[in-house]
Each structure stands twice: as structure tokens, then as C-alpha cells.
């Protein structure tokens, strides 16, 4: 296409005008689709594969069936370890109540992480303002990590629960129930979520491996299951990190990504403590710690697993486990790693001498 411009009435300048896009809508849709695909690629797998409905939640079938019967019901605290499905379960409940409608979810469901807003102001302002508006049905307020709230905030929350119980349901999620004041606990129905059974974690893990086309070896799978300890969130996060860093996710890749000592290193440490002199063993373990960036806390956990699975005389096992527990406790109170390493070495020598004398 050409456009003409008159110049001094005599000359005519021909100018090429740009062609209009043939299909703007299609190009915008294509760009939008590309962005959506990119967002899905970089999304954490924990969120990408979070259960959408109650039927998608693995394990805890007795709790799920009870919740099915209780919708709508009394205020409920969901208790126990992280990564066991507490938040996923209540979000699935919210979708079931409000039909998965995003607008309805925004208007009727308030989700707060109490570890970010833990003071009394969040109860007096956000929660009370949201709860005070009436609707035809009822609203849902989800307080995640409520054990991080101050006692004053929990006391204020108790009064809000009493005042707005006709049109609001509260879900209080916590990892440590002893940090929730009794006045709040007594107004709720409790659901305790234990660590996920290993077969359930493996089943969900296999689904993600297949969907994401992860090259996962059998020893890598067993290492993931062992280190996750029933925490689905941890298992998926480690799997995604390994997939991003390595072409093949094997046992070595899993231990490298998590920073945990390799079982072969733990066996070498135990053999050194049992068979070598005190000084030689101390130097060897200190060198290994520095070379691989190991923490004594992780070494103790590995030693515990080793002692629990290898044949030892009964009294030797008792002495070793008792001293491992003592060293771990002292480390948790801030004791020096160097001193506690010597304590660990001394305890091992005492246990071995005890078994030899018998």
C-alpha cells in the first residue's frame, strides 16, 4: 500500500505505509498462551499439583469423610506437621462450598497467613471487618500457621468467633497445637494430620514424575521417600530442584540437593569412629565435614539410621542411641559442634568397649 504527500504543489513523494496486522486477536491470544505456558513451566510443582478437590487429597480418608459430612459445620483447627495436606484440604473444602467460582471465593473466603500478620490488629481490622458483613450463606476465614499468632491476638479471635458464628466459619491451621490457647481450642473441632504414609507419597510422586517426564532412578526414588519423612511438600520441592540441576535424578543428586550426608559417608564415619583412634577419627570426620559442607546435626541423624538398621549388641545399641540423643539435644541448645563431635566420638568408643568386654 502506498500513500502520497503533496510537496510544493509540483512534487509528489511516494511513502510506503506499514501494513496493518492481519489478525491482531490471534497474535494477542498466541502471546497470552505463551505467557501462560511459561508461567506453568516456572510454577513450583507444590502449587501446580496441589489437590483441587477433596477427592484429590491423598491419605487421611477418615478426616476427609468427616469433613464431607460437616460442610457447613463448626470452626475447625487442622493440626500437625507441615506438608501433610492441611492447607490443601481446607482450600478444597472452600472450592466445594463455593463451587470453584473465583469471584465467589474472593468475596466469601478470607485466607490469612498468621506468621505474616500475627498481631492483634489483624483480628480487630481484617478479620472483624470481613466477618461483620452479612451474606445469604456463610463466609469462610482460613488462618494458616495460627500457632504464630500472639496470645493477645488469639484472645481477640476467641471473641470474634463467638460474635460472628452465625454467618462465618473459621478454620485454624497450625503445626503446634500447644501454642493455641485453650479458649480457642475448646470452640473448635480438631482434625489431626499425621505424616503421609510412604505408599501414598510414592503414588503421588510417581504421578508427578510421569507428568513432568523426570528421569528418576529407583535409588533416587527411595532416597526421596526416606528424606521426605511423609512431607509431600518437601518431596516435590526436592524432586523439582534435582530435575532442574541434573539430567538424571539418582540417589547422589537427591543427597547433593538437600545437603544431607550420603549413606556411604555415614557408613565411613561410623566405621572410623568404631575402628580408628580418637585423633585419627576426629581429623577424618572434621575433614569430611569441611569438604562436603555437612552439619553435625545431619551426621547424627545419619548415625541414628545406621545404628537402627545395623546389628549391634543390645546394650551397645542402647548406649549409642542414648548418647546420640544427648549430643543432639546439646546442639539444639547452641553447644559447639567441635565439642559435641568429641562427645560423639567418646560415646562411640565407650559403647564399643562395652560390647567387647561382654
Image (cartoon, helix red, strand yellow):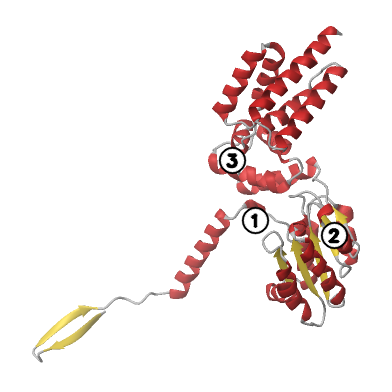
Return the residue nearer the eye: 2 or 161. Answer: 161
Within 10 Å of disc 2 (Cα), the crowding (few <14, some 14-19, many 20+) is some
Quadrant of res 286? top right
Q: Which label sits in the foreground, 3 or 2?
A: 2
Q: Is residue 201 above or below residue 322?
A: below
Q: From mark 1 to mark 2, how far is it between C-alphas?
A: 34 Å
Q: Which numbered disc flags the more N-terminal residue, 3 or 1?
A: 1
Q: Which mark is residue 167?
A: none
Q: Residue at x 67, y 16 (%)?
A: 272
Q: Is residue 165 left or right of residue 225?
A: right
Q: Provide the residue designation for mark 3.
A: 242
Q: Residue at x 59, y 43 (%)?
A: 241
Q: Is residue 133 visible?
A: yes
Indicate the secondary structure of the residue bearing disc 2: loop
Q: Residue at x 82, y 66 (%)?
A: 155
Q: Could you tell me if the residues under marks 3 and 2 are in contact, i.e. CB atoms within 8 Å?
A: no
Return the residue nearer the eye: 33 or 45. Answer: 45
Quadrant assignment for the C terminus: top right
Return the residue nearer the eye: 266 or 37. Answer: 266
Give coordinates of residue 133: x percent, y percent: 76, 82
Q: From mark 3 to mark 1, how far is it between C-alphas?
A: 17 Å
Q: Is residue 221 left or right of residue 36?
A: right
Indicate the secondary structure of the residue bearing disc 1: helix
Indicate the secondary structure of the residue bearing disc 3: helix
Q: Provide the residue designation for mark 2.
A: 181
Q: Which numbered disc flags the more N-terminal residue, 3 or 2?
A: 2
Q: Is residue 308 visible?
A: no
Q: Is residue 115 above or below residue 10?
A: above
Amino acid at each position: 500500500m502506498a500513500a502520497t504527500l503533496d510537496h510544493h504543489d509540483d512534487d509528489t513523494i511516494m511513502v510506503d505505509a506499514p501494513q496493518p496486522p492481519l489478525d491482531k486477536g490471534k497474535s494477542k491470544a498466541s502471546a497470552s498462551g505463551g505467557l501462560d505456558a511459561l508461567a506453568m513451566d516456572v510454577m513450583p510443582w507444590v502449587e501446580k499439583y496441589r489437590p483441587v478437590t477433596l477427592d484429590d487429597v491423598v491419605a487421611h480418608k477418615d478426616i476427609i469423610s468427616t469433613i464431607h459430612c460437616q460442610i457447613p459445620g463448626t470452626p475447625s483447627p487442622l493440626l500437625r506437621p507441615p506438608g501433610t495436606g492441611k492447607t490443601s484440604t481446607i482450600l478444597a473444602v472452600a472450592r466445594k462450598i463455593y463451587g470453584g467460582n473465583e469471584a465467589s471465593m474472593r468475596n466469601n473466603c478470607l485466607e490469612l497467613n498468621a506468621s505474616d500478620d500475627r498481631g492483634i490488629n489483624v483480628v480487630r481490622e481484617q478479620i472483624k471487618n470481613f466477618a461483620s458483613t452479612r451474606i445469604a450463606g456463610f463466609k469462610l476465614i482460613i488462618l494458616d500457621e495460627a500457632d504464630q499468632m500472639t496470645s493477645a491476638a488469639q484472645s481477640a479471635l476467641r471473641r470474634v468467633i463467638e460474635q460472628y458464628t452465625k454467618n462465618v466459619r473459621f478454620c485454624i491451621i497450625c503445626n503446634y497445637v500447644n501454642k493455641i490457647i485453650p479458649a480457642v481450642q475448646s470452640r473448635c473441632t480438631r482434625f489431626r494430620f499425621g505424616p503421609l504414609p510412604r505408599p501414598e507419597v510414592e503414588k503421588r510422586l510417581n504421578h508427578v514424575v510421569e507428568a513432568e517426564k523426570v528421569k528418576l532412578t529407583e535409588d533416587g526414588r527411595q532416597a526421596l521417600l526416606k528424606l521426605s519423612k511423609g512431607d509431600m511438600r518437601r518431596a516435590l520441592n526436592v524432586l523439582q530442584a534435582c530435575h532442574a540441576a541434573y539430567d538424571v535424578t539418582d540417589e547422589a543428586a537427591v543427597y547433593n540437593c538437600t545437603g544431607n550426608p550420603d549413606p556411604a559417608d555415614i557408613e565411613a564415619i561410623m566405621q572410623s569412629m568404631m575402628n580408628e583412634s580418637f585423633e585419627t577419627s576426629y581429623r577424618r570426620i572434621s575433614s569430611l565435614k569441611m569438604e562436603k559442607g555437612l552439619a553435625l546435626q545431619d551426621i547424627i541423624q545419619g548415625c541414628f539410621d545406621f545404628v537402627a538398621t545395623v546389628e549391634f549388641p543390645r546394650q551397645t545399641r542402647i548406649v549409642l542411641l542414648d548418647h546420640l540423643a544427648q549430643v543432639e539435644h546439646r546442639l539444639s541448645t547452641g553447644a559447639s559442634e567441635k565439642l559435641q563431635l568429641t562427645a560423639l566420638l567418646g560415646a562411640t568408643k565407650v559403647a564399643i568397649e562395652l560390647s567387647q568386654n561382654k
